[in-house]
Amino acid sequence: MKGAFSYFVFGSWWVSLCASAMGLLSWLELTGTWWNAPLFVFLLGSTLVIYNLNMISGLAELRVKGTESERHHWCINNERLMKFTLGLGLVLTFISIWFLNVVVWWLMIPLGIVALAYTVPIVRRNAQKIRLREIGLWKIFIIAIVWVGMTVILPSVHLYGFEQIIEIFSWELALERGIFILAITIPFDIRDLVNDAKKEIRTIPSTIGWKRSVVLSQLLLAVFMILIWLRIGTDHPFFYAYFISSILTFTCVSVATPKRSDYYCSFWVEGTMILQLGAVLLCLTTLSFT
């Protein structure tokens, strides 16, 4: 049972479901309906590709330098399984993209380049090639940009096509989502403090300290809720769904420390994205019965 759960979490199925949940939440905000099968499958498949490729590309270095991470040890011991999962993600992505607005293909070019540069060492710095994730202080913002592009801009482009660029509402959603992703990504950098120090990667926690980084994460969640309030007000039923899920997320990030297990970040922190969609859907269900 633990082996199956480890594959579900460390094989990136859980984070892929989280990405799909964020995309469906954006679709709900944009259209009033929450389900879109091609969008769900595309986000699931493409996230499987990106995250498994990221881990596979770093395995050689992990084998040489060693690691104390349970997640890294699982990945080292299950490389073939990750490659199979990556291949399955490619199939899901390729099939589903044909059912999306053709304009999505244009959006995938810049997002794909950034995602590839994040996972594979193709960016040249000095005399060697590095991954974007190794440019420490920029890493968290690159992650936020890709997540916003995939879970907000992509659904909006699927809906509006090229007119997405003038849709102010989707850009408001993008700003909110970016702030939220920044908030829940900080605990990952806190978790990786020791490994990043070995690689001499400078991150926010290594710069300001992990305790101040927790406070920064909390402040970002507060800013997220202020943006929600400014957009929909307290009279909108979604406000309370966002508020409750944000309180639970606030609690989750508040206990971040460098000694937290990999499951804390890879399951609980990432799970706050599904929590957010779940709270909104519960709100809709409650309203339908009143």
Image (tube, helix red, strand yellow):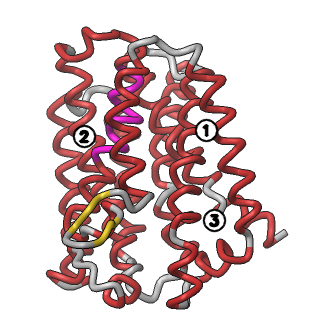
Please say if 54 is above or below 114: below
Identify residue for label 2. Answer: 176
**Residue 147 is a magenta residue:** yes
Left or right: residue 223 compared with residue 106: left
Circle 3 — which element? helix
Range of residues picked out in magenta: 145-156
- Marking on residue 10: 3
- Indicate the amino acid at tag 3: Phe
Q: How packed is label 1: few (under 14 Cα within 10 Å), some, or many (20 or more)?
A: many
Looking at the image, do the residues carrying marks 2 and 1 touch, with CB atoms under 8 Å apart?
Answer: no
Circle 1 — which element? helix
**Residue 26 is a magenta residue:** no
Whichever of labels 3 and 2 marks the residue nearer the N terminus, that label is 3
Left or right: residue 210 compared with residue 253: left
**Residue 2 location, x and y as percent?**
79, 72
**Separation of residues labelled 2 and 1 (CA atoms):** 24 Å
